Amino acid sequence: MPADFNWAIGGEAGDGIDSTGKIFAQALSRAGRHVYTSKDFASRIRGGYTAYKIRTAVEPVQSVVDRLDVLIALTPRTIDENLGELHDNSVIIYDGERTTMKNAEIPDEMVGLNVPLKRLAEEAGGAIMRNVVALGAACAVADFPIENLDEAVEKRFGNKGQKLVDNNKEAARAGRQYVHDEYDLNLPYALETTDNDYVLLNGDEAIGMGALAAGCRYYAGYPITPATNVMEYLKGRIERYGGHVVQAEDELSAINMALGAARAGARSMTATSGPGIDLMTETFGLVATTETPLVICNVMRSGPSTGMPTKQEQGDINQMLYGGHGEIPRFVLAPTTIDECFWKTVEAFNLAEKYQLPVYLAGDLALAVTEQTFSPEAFDMDAVEIERGNVVDEETIGAWQNEKGQFKPHALTDDGISPRAFPGTSGGAHMTTGLEHDELGRRTEDGEMRIKQVDKRNKKVDTAEEREDWSPREFGDPDSENLVISWGSNEGAMVEAIDLLAEEGVDVRFISVPYIFPRPDLSDEIADAKEVLVVECNNTGQFADLLEHDALARVGRINKYDGVRYKADELADEISAALADTPEAIQ
Amino acid sequence: MSSDVRFTDFKSDKQPTWCPGCGDFGTMNGMMKALANTGNDPDNTFIIAGIGCSGKIGTYMHSYALHGVHGRALPLAAGVKMANPDLEVMAAGGDGDGYSIGVGHFIHAVRRNVDMSYIVMDNRIYGLTKGQASPTSREDFETSTTPDGPKQPPVNPLALALSAGATFIAQSFSSDAMRHAEIVQEAIEHDGFGFVNVFSPCVTFNDVDTYDYFRDSLVDVADTDHDPTDYDAAKDVILDMDKEYQGVLYQNESAQSYEAEHDLTENMAEIPDGAPDDAMDLVREFY
């Protein structure tokens, strides 16, 4: 486990918590430190409790932990909410002159720094900069170079004029100076810096960037937490490449627009969350049966119905695998880290076009709102390959026409894959329909053709299973008899939990699965293990169900559905306890 | 695109299953004529159809075509056109598809003003499900599901369109073949969302809104001094409770299409073999 430092700012929605936290995360990144952030936030514009938390270390960090070293508390509730994570040496920075904080109780064992944030900000040019004063105070606590904070301030306010930048820099210095003058601190928080250059981005941004790298040219969506950032990232950037983002009137429209663009030959996508998937499910079957390549990104949040819109959950496996009436194959990919959000997006576009079907790209709130540092090389654009599958042009179309010269968009083939002719291709005019259809894409109720078309669509899955790499990611001790399996965003916490478990003398083999369908066959691994634990953020263990189905064996389950992602230390404790327990269900 | 395209080139070799005498035959013929007259050919034309008797039209015509789910033809069509503005895009559907399940999309498609045409075969009945009330059925129109009539006023699609900021509103009658084809042609030529409500009688389930009714009652604005560029005049004919009109009722020729507003000119199907040349700049933005 890296020598880490855990920092947070908390207050009410409307206090600028998010942007202040982002500035500090950026500053740490500029100082060559790794950063992993998380947010506590509510679905409201003002009021409530909201916090931005940063874990930082010189080594890579990929999880939150149950510990807080420095807390900037703008409200008393911020302290209460975090009591469980604060410890004896924790520092609480607060403004005792703020009416609501006058009577705030700082626990005796902690270090309270009463800094007149508002007053110092006003002296520097405006009360609005009080959070930046607090950042300056944090720099004093962590012996952190103010120049790196300057860089982040320039990035944040640079387009708003030099005066504002200078005022903010002054505000930060005032906060730092105040702590130096008023407190004689002897704390173990000096933050080491390095010369490394990192980029700092969240999962939604990584998905958006992956889409641009993959040649996505059309995006239609409807705003929904926590997927909106994908649309906001693409808007303003996709146009550079001749693409377009459209905000539709609802998700029914969004998926239909995206489908229309895909029929026109564009690499097309939409992104939404569970409630949007509910609506899109209406058109999902049409996408699949017309064999149209489409990437549908589902940034999962807590359900059902409106659920907890700003909370983590991985509850939509069944919806993505089985949503819609009738039977039709679809692929479901679930990136396990933020950099993998980028690569899995590229892969999703390639798979969609090669196999001519809808691909669900399942992110989740924990990936979507987390900012994390990476080496720029993690996004090596030269390594991006674009594979468009069987697209015919005027020269090659002849092979796919019948004796009347009619193009066959659903031609029966050995591998199940038919040709695509983009509109405008001479000799390619064809229809397709949500009705069962023949090779020409025309309605049929002929039993034999029905069977052939169903089999053909399913055959594409067999073909993809043969041709593509569906391997999971492996960590820990490959020879351990304790097997932990998870999918999606739990990987980071689990990777760090492996180290914590090792300190306790517990070894584990960890398999992190980014493919829900098709997925790797883990029957042998499950059979070889003495104990199997499947970790996921849902109540019923939807992935565990699939593994049991595959392996014809029972697996143990660790589930979390309180709306908060796993923390590394918490997960290590749960696994340790489960292994000590050996519930009967585990073979 | 060739100049010697005949309207029969837009006909597929599939025989329609519409009832003999169905208005949709005439509606489709007019669409094919208008497409040919405007210099289109099947390889650059994309027809999007909804669900219902009208939705079958993509099968009977020859072009690129997609027969979608119920009520969503307009967003489908918008997606096709935005992704490749060179295509001639035409959406077709019925009154149920467009004014009931799809009415939300109708309003927004009108606002969006994508350069396409939308042909609604309005027979004031649900035909394919064998005769239930549609949103344009008369208040006292008795059907299996409304034995005493819907007892609610019919939707006025023209008024909906006008209030949503339409740039082209027309109405035609499927059996007035020449006029219908002319009106659809104007919708195609309009630089924006060309909306045509076509009275396309159902001979099986609607004995009120019949060929005879429309033949006797329709007023052609071409025979009057109606000026379609006059908004107030358009409002008057569209809100007239006593008469029904055919012709181009309203046209705003100065409005910009969605594609012009958003500078959409490229065929988005064409992309490079790898990430864009400057793609590492996207990464560097996150420094």
Image: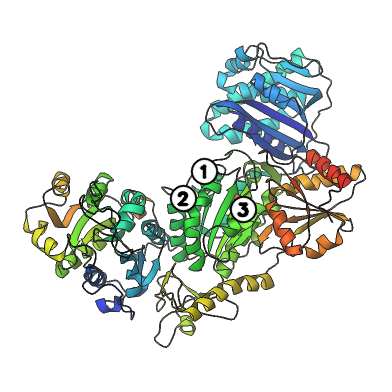
Question: Closest to the observer: A3 or A515?
Answer: A515
Question: Closest to the observer: A121 or B225?
Answer: B225
> What residue lies at 83% left-to-right and 62% top-to-bottom?
A527
Secondary structure of the residue carrying numbered label 1: loop
Question: Closest to the observer: A421 or A587?
Answer: A587
Secondary structure of the residue carrying numbered label 3: strand
**What is the quadrant of residue A518 in the picture?**
bottom right
Query: Please, what is the three-letter code of the amino acid marked with disc 3?
Result: Ala
Tell me the subunit letter for badge 2. Answer: A
**What is the quadrant of residue A433 in the picture?**
bottom left
| Nearest to N terminus: mark 2 or mark 1 | 1
Tell me the subunit letter for badge 1. Answer: A
Task: Specify the quadrant that holds the C terminus of chain A.
Answer: bottom right
| Nearest to N terminus: mark 3 or mark 2 | 2
Residue under circle 3? A362
> What residue lies at 70% left-to-right and 50% top-to-bottom?
A541
Residue under circle 2? A251
Spot occupied by residue B194 in the image (x, y as percentages of width and height): 26, 57
Residue under circle 1? A224
Tell me the subunit letter for badge 3. Answer: A
